[in-house]
């Protein structure tokens, strides 16, 4: 995002200043709205999806006429320009723009837009752009209501989402739309956004000066979110203005210092949406950092999740899974620690739960690793799904009910405890899996290194040669 804005709203806003030339906040839209780009040239970032000839650029520029106007699903983090790009699509070729939010709109609202779009097309040969924000909040039935209008190009749907469309949007709608993926702005692009907002008449109009260290603080806490950067800038400008004694005269712009930005933004908000796609990204990073034995990275992602307000019980469950999947029998005590942590977190809660979770994360990260149990059960399940695994051998079948003996169930079963070493030599696997399967293969790491020799001995003791 960058300088500029859309609609007559902004012309009125520029003149809405008090006697000292300062913005009169009551009559102004938020700074992030005032600075919304009016043209492609004013957009910051997204150079890949807006390159000349790209599908989105052609849609915005109206290339190919109405026949080539495809609907688009725009997926990206907050503050990367999804709403801006929707407005730019609407301005091309004098299109009509209708905006709905999936939070409040329903099927009836969608059908009303479709009917109005049909009238606009038939009477005025004018296309309608329907911008649907937060489309991931629509149910399957509500998304189904969009299909006829998108299919016939009765409307150009521009839908915005912060969640992965593969999981949140129905396949028929995805197949009829372009998928546009936006990325967070770079630090330099956020600096450009801030500089433009300070100087532009639609922004702070040069009446404030942003100190370098204050700029860097705003860039850092924005996390690539232009809207967050501009919101924090506007708040910091208010703090700076409030710090000027009443009745005092001033020359030149009001300086926005680091102290002003820190006061305006009590802490660096975490770039993490615990209900959106990043919920899974950060959780995945935590698991992979523990698996990779990087304890510092694991603690970093744990801290990010906690500071974002993630449910500590969710985190604890993920740690329990990792203790079996990635550590397993290389350190059996890792699962004990993780399960104990899960129960303790449920009883204690935050903020003390952070310490318990940290202990479990450190244990998982530092433990020797083995996924032998994980791969073993996956291979066993794969064989079952492939149709392998015949009848249970007769000697292993239940014999504790009437008629079982007559059927031969249990005949020939050797009771392991009756053997001198407590291990009976007999077949346990179904016939079609005998001699071809070793699901569990212990590694030479941690406690599992000690299990290897016993596993070899047990295998040779239990499995006799099949003739």
Image: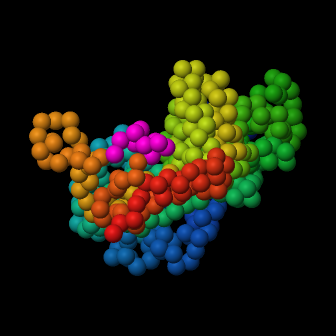
Describe residue 345's horizontal placement relative to residue 68 as left or right.
right
Which residue is painted at 53% across and 49% down in the image?
325
| On screen, residue 328 above or below 372 | above
Q: Position of residue 49 (x, y in %)?
A: 55, 69
Residue drawn at the location 45% of the way across and 46% of the way down: 423
> Residue 335, can we see it?
yes
Q: Is residue 420 magenta?
A: yes
Query: Between 261 and 171, which is closer to the camera in this rendering?
Result: 171
Residue lying at the far top in this picture: please name it: 347
Residue for point 67% across, 49% down: 446
| The N terminus: image quadrant | bottom right
Tag count: 0
- The front one of 110 and 97 is 110
Judging depth in this view, the residue of 437 and 385 nearest the camera is: 437
Image quadrant assignment for residue 121: bottom left
Display coloring: rainbow
Q: Nearer the viewer, residue 5 or 326?
A: 326
**435 in the magenta segment:** no
Q: Which residues are magenta?
A: 414-423
As drawn, 431 above or below 313 = below
- Say above or below: 112 vs 63: above
Residue in the picture at 65% in, 23% down: 352
Q: Main secondary structure of the magenta part?
A: loop
Q: Position of residue 338 (x, y in %)?
A: 58, 35
Q: Position of residue 420 (x, y in %)?
A: 47, 42
Q: The C terminus lies in which quarter of the figure?
A: bottom left
Which picture quadrant has residue 24? top right
């Amino acid at each position: 995002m960058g300088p500029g804005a859309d609609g007559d709203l902004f012309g009125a806003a520029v003149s809405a200043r008090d006697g000292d030339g300062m913005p009169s906040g009551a009559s102004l839209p938020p700074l992030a709205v005032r600075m919304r780009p009016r043209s492609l040239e004013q957009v910051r970032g997204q150079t890949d999806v807006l390159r000349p000839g790209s599908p989105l650029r052609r849609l915005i520029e109206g290339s190919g006429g109405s026949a080539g106007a495809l609907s688009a699903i725009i997926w990206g983090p907050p503050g990367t320009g999804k709403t801006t790009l929707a407005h730019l699509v609407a301005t091309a070729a004098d299109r009509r723009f209708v905006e709905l939010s999936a939070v409040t709109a329903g099927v009836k609202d969608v059908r009303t837009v479709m009917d109005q779009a049909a009238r606009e097309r038939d009477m005025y040969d004018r296309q309608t752009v329907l911008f649907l924000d937060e489309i991931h909040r629509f149910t399957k039935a509500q998304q189904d209501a969009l299909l006829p209008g998108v299919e016939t190009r009765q409307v150009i749907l521009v839908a915005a989402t912060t969640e992965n469309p593969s999981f949140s949007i129905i396949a028929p709608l995805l197949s009829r739309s372009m998928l546009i993926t936006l990325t967070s702005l770079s630090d330099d692009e956020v600096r450009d956004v801030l500089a433009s907002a300070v100087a532009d008449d639609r922004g702070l109009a040069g009446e404030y000066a942003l100190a370098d260290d204050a700029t860097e603080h705003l860039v850092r806490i924005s996390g690539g979110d232009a809207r967050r950067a501009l919101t924090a800038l506007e708040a910091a400008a208010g703090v700076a203005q409030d710090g000027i004694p009443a009745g005092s005269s001033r020359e030149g712009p009001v300086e926005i210092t680091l102290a002003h930005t820190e006061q305006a933004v009590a802490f660096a908000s975490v770039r993490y949406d615990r209900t959106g796609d990043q919920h899974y990204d950060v959780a995945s990073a935590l698991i992979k950092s523990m698996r990779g034995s990087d304890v510092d990275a694991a603690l970093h992602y744990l801290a990010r999740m906690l500071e974002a307000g993630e449910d500590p019980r969710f985190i604890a469950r993920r740690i329990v899974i990792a203790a079996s999947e990635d550590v397993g029998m290389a350190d059996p005590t890792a699962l004990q620690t993780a399960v104990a942590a899960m129960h303790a977190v449920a009883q204690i809660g935050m903020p003390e739960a952070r310490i318990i979770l940290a202990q479990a994360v450190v244990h998982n990260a530092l433990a020797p690793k083995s996924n032998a149990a994980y791969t073993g059960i996956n291979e066993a399940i794969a064989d079952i799904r492939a149709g392998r695994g015949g009848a249970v051998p007769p000697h292993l079948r239940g014999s504790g009910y009437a008629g079982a003996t007559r059927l031969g169930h249990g005949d020939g079963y050797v009771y392991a405890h009756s053997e001198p070493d407590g291990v009976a030599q007999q077949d346990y696997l179904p016939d079609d899996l005998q001699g071809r399967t070793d699901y569990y293969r212990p590694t030479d790491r941690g406690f599992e290194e000690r299990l290897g020799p016993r596993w070899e001995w047990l295998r040779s003791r239990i499995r006799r040669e099949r003739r």
